[in-house]
Image (cartoon, helix red, strand yellow):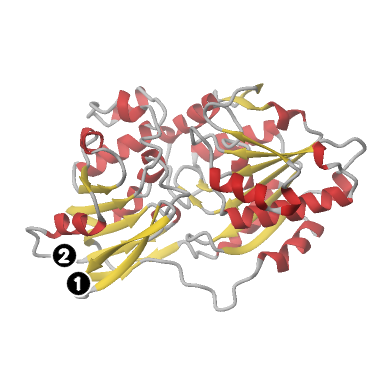
Amino acid sequence: MVDCWLPYGDTEIYVSIEMDNLIKILEPIKAEEPKQIGDVLLKALDEPTGAGTLEQLVGPDCRVAIAVDASMNPQTACQILSAVVKQLVELIVPRDRITIILGDIMRDNGNNRLVEAIREKSGLSQVRVIDNTRSSSGHVDLGETRAGTPVRINREYHEATLKIAVGDVTVDSHTGFKGAHSAVIPGIASPQTLLENRRNYFKGAVSPGVIELNPVKEDQMEAVKMAGIDFAVNAASDPAGEFIDVFCGGFEESWGKAVTALEGCYEFMVDGVSDITMVSAGGGRYDYNLYSASMALKEASRVTKRNGAIILLAECSEGLGADAFNKLSRVMELSEFGRRYTYGAEALQLIKQITRNQRVILVSALPQYIVESIGIEPAKTANEAYTMAITGRRARGTYVIPYGSTCKLVV
């Protein structure tokens, strides 16, 4: 037997798989000599591309807003914020004129782990921190994109004289790749901005790791330019959230360099398809609700046989996370999800599409009746789910994917 430990919420759970059944564990290869963010961050801040240095951007009576993608690795986020705030203070910007805004629009209650990490960091303890969640108000209307998305962003960010954005560059199921700009749109935008941007999912080919002709990404970038970013910090991270490199400056220029720095570390070669695929959404950064976690099914389904089984490990401690799971749960016609779009409809459509041809078993904290109402089978543990998947099957070839939300599978 092989014991595989997989991310689940803020911990790990294990599943035991027969050695003969295990085809491959699809996880990133650790670099022999990984870069340390402290070794390269200061140089990146001093040598930005596509924008001036912080020294050149800071003006008299400067008021600074720093938008941070709240899904970032807390350690990486705090190291970047500490370095940026330190430079600003050395440039005679008082700490009470610096505001950190957590881009947390995907969640109802915010990311407490990141808030605590920031407050425990000595250099950040006196800096004001606010959280932009789905229940936040006080947004400023900046107009609409060409696709009709209303661009409404946090007022304090809009009124700042220096706008900074910080984020991870990782694979994203909606925009191809995330970046510092994701901290602004959708991070510190209004729920309506997020909803209308996600509606574009049904207007073209949207796939993890693909940015060309991606209607969600194109609409997002237009909205970001309307909101404005004076200085961006893009930290390239592998699927496990481990730091690779960091780039600063213009948000598009530094993002492009960070995507290049990934060097395909998010791509995993697969040898044919499996009978069973065990996929974790990737832990607490991605599995806090079902809406976020369910997008990990997209890649898993691609490498699983017709009539095969997919086991999704996702704690979902914050529930379903989207209106669509309640409002559209009885819709069966796939085309109706785009026409009757409500927040999260693309995730529910994905689930409905997959369950037509494959069995989906969910290990989560969600009540059984809720899981079953959307066409998924519940299980209490990963081992129970695996037993359910192999029962009655002759072929049991299994893939294990520890970071399903941040990988691209190459068949």
Which residue occupies 85% across, 48% down? 89
Upstream in sequence: badge 2 or badge 1: 1
Say whether residue 85 is left or right of residue 240.
right
Say whether residue 256 is left or right of residue 44.
left
Q: Relative to the observer, which residue lies in front, 239 or 104?
A: 104
* Residue at the farthest right position: 60
Q: Could you tell me the amino acid type at mark 2?
A: Arg
Of tags 2 and 1, which is closer to the observer? Answer: 1
Query: Callout 1: helix, strand or loop?
Result: loop
C-beta proximity under 8 Å, tags 2 and 1: yes
Disc 1 marks which residue? 18
* Residue at the farthest left position: 392
Residue 83's x, y, as percent? 75, 56
Which residue occupies 53% across, 42% down? 111
Across the whole image, how many numbered discs are drawn on residues? 2
Q: Relative to the observer, which residue lies in front, 209 or 6?
A: 6
Residue 297's x, y, as percent? 32, 49
Specify the quadrant that holds the C terminus: bottom left
Say if 295 sits above or below 333 in the image.
below
Q: Residues within 10 Å of mark 1 (few under 14, many from 20)?
A: few
Specify the quadrant that holds the N terminus: bottom left
Say if 378 sits above or below 226 in the image.
below
Disc 2 marks which residue? 396
Q: Residues within 10 Å of mark 2 (few under 14, many from 20)?
A: many
Q: CA distance from mark 2 to mark 1?
A: 9 Å
Which residue occupies 40% across, 47% down? 287
| Observer able to see residue 208 | yes
Query: Callout 2: helix, strand or loop?
Result: loop
Q: Could you tell me the amino acid type at mark 1?
A: Glu
Which residue occupies 45% across, 67% down? 28
